[in-house]
Amino acid sequence: MKHLIVVFVLLSTLGHHWLTAIPVSELETLKLLSEQIALQQKIIQSLTNKIDSHDNISLISTQSILGSTLPSITSTTGKLQQGFNLINLIGHTGDVNTLIKLSNDNLLASGSDDNTIKIWNLKTNSLIRTLSGSSGHVLSLAVLNNGYLASGSADKSIQIWNAETGQQIRKLNGHLGEVKSLAVLNNGMLASGSLDQSIKIWNTDFEQCSNFCVFRTIKAHKDSVLCLYALKNGNLASGGGNLDPTIKIWNINYEDGLIKTFTGHYAAILTLVQIQNGNLISGSADKTIKIWDMLSGNVLRTLVGHTNLVNDLAALYPNGGPNGYLASCSDDANVRIWDLASTKNAVWTLPLHQEPIKSLTILKNGYIVSASTDNTIKLWDMAGFLATLAN
């Protein structure tokens, strides 16, 4: 029996669109795929040459042909880059929830719903070690000042690892709910946020606290504590769940150390990052990103563009300059790049994954690393792309 396969091809030039349906036999599929890739490249090159002077044009050219996706970049400037350097790290068998660079910037750690942490060599793009021992999903990671790796788990515990040997150093118990976030404070202590609505501050000198390492417990929010960020001045920022979608700033040296509360989001705060000028940026389940003035607590700007939860944020400063970019990832399966010096919406939209993107980080070499519920990690040369546009 022959199967009828129909490929729909959308061609678009400066406001004019053509949708073509092409029936092909199963034996012709591979030939069609090759021809459509070549055709797409010609169209993109032609359009790119024509629209460089049209700043208000936005193009999307991600075509899925029989499950094979050809990614390209949507740009509000009308400049479109095809064939960017994309690297896949494959090894997890469950959602990849969290990423962190290790003390050696050539190493990356990832935590997953498969209950493992994997250590990757970014020079060879290969898996070098798997840390097993968690009895729950690995939800958060942090690197301690002594180089050890801390992981927060759905089993309510925090585990301390020697990432170089794979040895588990300590297991910290005390939370009554999943440990959703970790942050290392300026004084070297470890902060953890949990579904039990609390923040715990842990002494990381494990020789001194052989039995119980909790320095302080803070009843932080009226809902889950979903994210933490260690601020430059030594204070700690926390984000609450849907029943308490606020950002709170804490001085952890005091029992009741709440300094201020920021309100503005109407759904859970999922991620926080502080940028070079001191402003705080938050990503929320309300699909928006907000930039906050740390002194007044006022919203300076709201970034709109994602169509689902904003799960993680990271800042990038090419060439060490003050005018940086913000990278955001979402359950809408896109990474968006925002120009922090511009009042416009996202400059680039990167369809790097097919499923929700849960975490991202930026390496010193300018690569963006993203982790997804598609069980993969992807690396993309953001700095190289910016350099290409600047030329």
Image: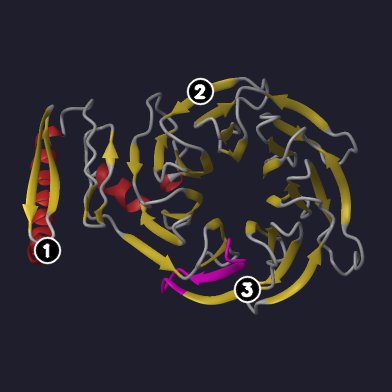
Residue 385 visible in this rendered orientation of the protein: yes
Marks 1 and 2 close (CB-CB < 8 Å) = no
Q: Position of residue 70 (x, y in %)?
A: 23, 53
> Relative to 234, is 355 on the left or the right?
left
Q: CA distance from mark 3 to mark 2?
A: 41 Å
Q: CA distance from mark 1 to mark 3?
A: 44 Å
The reply to whether the magenta stretch includes residue 115 is yes
**Which of the marked residues, 3 or 2, is nearer the chain's N terminus?**
3
> Relative to 239, is 357 on the left or the right?
left
Q: Position of residue 357 (x, y in %)?
A: 46, 49
Q: Residue furthest bottom?
A: 165
> Relative to 211, is 303 on the left or the right?
left
Type of amino acid under label 1: Glu
Q: Which mark is residue 358?
A: none
Residue 230 visible in this rendered orientation of the protein: no
Q: Residue at x 84, y 66 (%)?
A: 206
Of circles 3 and 2, the one toward us is 3
Q: Which residue in the protein does label 2 denote?
A: 301
Type of amino acid under label 3: Leu
Towards the viewer: 383 or 162: 162
**Which of the marked residues, 1 or 3, is nearer the chain's N terminus?**
1
Q: Position of residue 381 (x, y in %)?
A: 35, 55
Q: Is residue 248 above or below residue 377?
A: above
Towards the viewer: 366 or 307: 307
Q: Which residue in the protein does label 3 denote?
A: 131
Q: Which residue in the protein does label 1 denote?
A: 26
> Relative to 385, is 92 on the left or the right?
right
Type of amino acid under label 2: Arg
The reply to whether the magenta stretch includes residue 92 is no
Q: Over which residues does the magenta segment extend? A: 113-126
Of circles 1 and 2, the one toward us is 1
